[in-house]
Image (tube, helix red, strand yellow):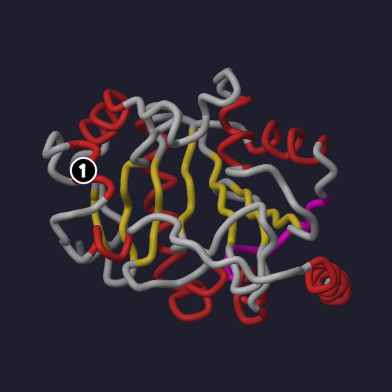
Amino acid sequence: PPDQFERFLANLRDGMSKKVHCVGADFCQELSGAADTDFSRTYQGSPGSRIICRSENLALLADMSPLTTGHLLLVSNEHYLSFGEVVRDHATEVEDALKLIYGQYSMTFGELVVMEHGSSQEMDGSACITHAHMHFLPLRLDAVHRAMTEDGLTALELTGIKDLKRLGERGLPYFYCGDSTRHRVYGVARKMRRQYLRSIAGKLLGIADPEWDYAVVLRKELLRATLARTAGWHISHHS
């Protein structure tokens, strides 16, 4: 209901604190074709790229430090802080890309969950301002939801991905989790542990703490396996 969503947004605004500026991932440089990036330094040309496919405003990548085979990222080609902002400007393109990904993913890796930490200009120390990106992982949404509610987070059901626009317009941070039919957003009104969504996914995948941290274990062979299994994918009917 609209009034429930407005109360949810008000709680997020009340919980926001000081600004934290830092560099998350150099997606902008990597997507522009720059030679010197985190990815190129880490993988040394094997492979030369982790970009699976692109549309006009989006790109699908293999996660540089995958938690499992099938760990993908959907990112914006231009710099946005969250998919709330991306949806504000490119809602139809995002919806179309997600539909295509759902179909290809289910046939290749099975059930999936989509996770995002939507960042903001106003955030506490649990994360940094970064480039909008969604994680795709072979997990069950109900299991993710249960783990997050055990951490004290409360979910609001959305009617669709377009509802993230209201968070982007207000510049509010959030956690989003969804699948092909359900969409949930969780408020970030208090400090959460670093790389919170990766830690949740790692726990559900049986990865020991802190080996879910992207800087602790890279699992390069899983990235290469993911690229091999997603060859020929597309996120646009025109690509």
Image quadrant occupied by the N terminus: bottom right
Mark 1 residue type = Arg
The answer to which image quadrant residue 219 occupies is: top left
Determine the residue positioned at 61% across, 32% down.
140
The percent coordinates of residue 44 (x first, y second) are: 14, 37
Determine the residue positioned at 19% across, 45% down.
40
| Magenta residue check for 76 | no
Q: Is residue 80 or residue 74 the one in the foreground?
A: 80
The percent coordinates of residue 131 (x first, y second) are: 44, 63
Mark 1 lies on a secondary structure that is helix
Q: Is residue 180 left or right of residue 200?
A: left
Determine the residue positioned at 45% across, 36% down.
214
> Would you place residue 130 above or below residue 39 in this image?
below
Image quadrant occupied by the C terminus: bottom left
Q: Is residue 96 or residue 9 the one in the foreground?
A: 9
Q: Is residue 108 or residue 192 the one in the foreground?
A: 192
Q: Magenta residues?
A: 154-162
> Would you place residue 72 above or below residue 234 in this image?
above
> Would you place residue 71 above or below residue 132 in this image?
above
The percent coordinates of residue 6 (x first, y second) are: 83, 76
Instruction: Identify the residue position indicated by label 1 in the image.
Output: 41
Q: Is residue 215 left or right of residue 123?
A: left
**Figure label count:** 1
Q: Is residue 56 left or right of residue 110?
A: left
The percent coordinates of residue 90 (x first, y second) are: 43, 76
Determine the residue positioned at 39% across, 42% down.
72
Q: Sort mark 1 into few (<14), some (14-19) or many (20+) by Cα contacts within 10 Å.
A: few
